[in-house]
């Protein structure tokens, strides 16, 4: 299933990486838009992701939306005032797996960003969302689940559909963050 999801979502993943990669995270404005886009994208996905992590991976799920709201507030941005993007209905067999794959994978990407550094620490700001490393724990629990069992064709197709839907939500969230008022002073 891991290779199936990677192959199915590869082009979407590449496009999304290009979008987010266009932001200069060493500038306050770039980091603010990055965090706003994640907040917008996670809003419709988080209930499904949380259920997956807690019920299927048997792990405590960090409250990423709360972390993002706090980070944005520290930057002077009202997270509740961000635009919303609609998510697909994700209550079907396999949907949690697809969403889990995308969100857990995004946490791996954040680990790489943390290594390269981002705006904030030298200025007295530390992003709780960016600093949280528990996503790696969820990824490590997810990989054996993806590799270690056979999935019925319908469930596998649903996981692919949900993963593609999650990438689409994040792509629309990135676009929405460009229209949102995420400018910051300083």
Image (tube, rainbow, N blue to C red):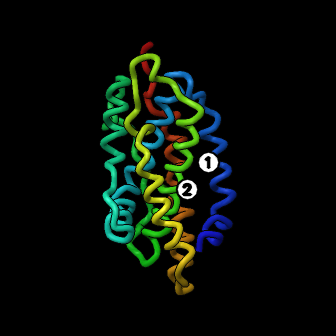
Q: Quadrant of residue 23?
A: top right
Q: Position of residue 129 (x, y in %)?
A: 40, 39
Query: In the rendered image, which residue does mark 2 sit on?
Result: 167
Would you say the residues marked 2 and 1 are in contact, meaning their CB atoms lie under 8 Å apart? yes
Q: Decide: is 172 above or below 129.
A: below
Q: Residue at x 49, y 45 (%)?
A: 173
Q: Position of residue 83 (x, y in %)?
A: 40, 41
Q: Residue at x 45, y 63 (%)?
A: 88
Q: Is residue 24 left or right of residue 103?
A: right
Q: Is residue 16 left or right of residue 71?
A: right
Q: Position of residue 68 (x, y in %)?
A: 37, 39
**Closer to the camera, 27 or 135?**
135
Q: Quadrant of residue 86?
A: bottom left
Q: Quadrant of residue 10?
A: bottom right
Q: What number is the disc on residue 16? A: 1
Mark 2 or 1, nearer chain start: 1
Q: Could you say whether the residue bearing mark 1 is in a helix, strand or loop?
A: helix
C-alpha distance separating marks 2 and 1: 7 Å
**Closer to the camera, 182 or 163?**
163
**Closer to the camera, 22 or 50?**
50
């Amino acid at each position: 299933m891991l290779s199936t999801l990677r192959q199915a979502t590869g082009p979407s993943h590449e496009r999304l990486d290009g979008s987010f990669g266009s932001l200069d995270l060493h500038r306050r404005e770039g980091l603010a838009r990055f965090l706003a886009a994640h907040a917008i994208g996670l809003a419709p996905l988080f209930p499904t992701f949380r259920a997956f992590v807690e019920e299927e991976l048997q792990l405590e799920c960090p409250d990423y939306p709360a972390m993002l709201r706090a980070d944005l507030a520290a930057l002077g941005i009202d997270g509740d005032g961000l635009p919303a993007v609609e998510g697909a209905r994700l209550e079907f067999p396999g949907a949690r797996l697809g969403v889990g794959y995308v969100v857990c994978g995004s946490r791996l990407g954040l680990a790489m960003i943390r290594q390269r550094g981002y705006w904030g620490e030298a200025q007295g700001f530390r992003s709780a969302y960016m600093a949280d490393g528990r996503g790696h724990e969820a990824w490590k629990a997810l990989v054996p689940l993806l590799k270690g069992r056979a999935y019925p064709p319908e469930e596998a197709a649903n996981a692919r559909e949900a993963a593609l839907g999650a990438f689409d939500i994040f792509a629309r969230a990135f676009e929405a963050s460009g229209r949102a008022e995420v400018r910051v002073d300083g």
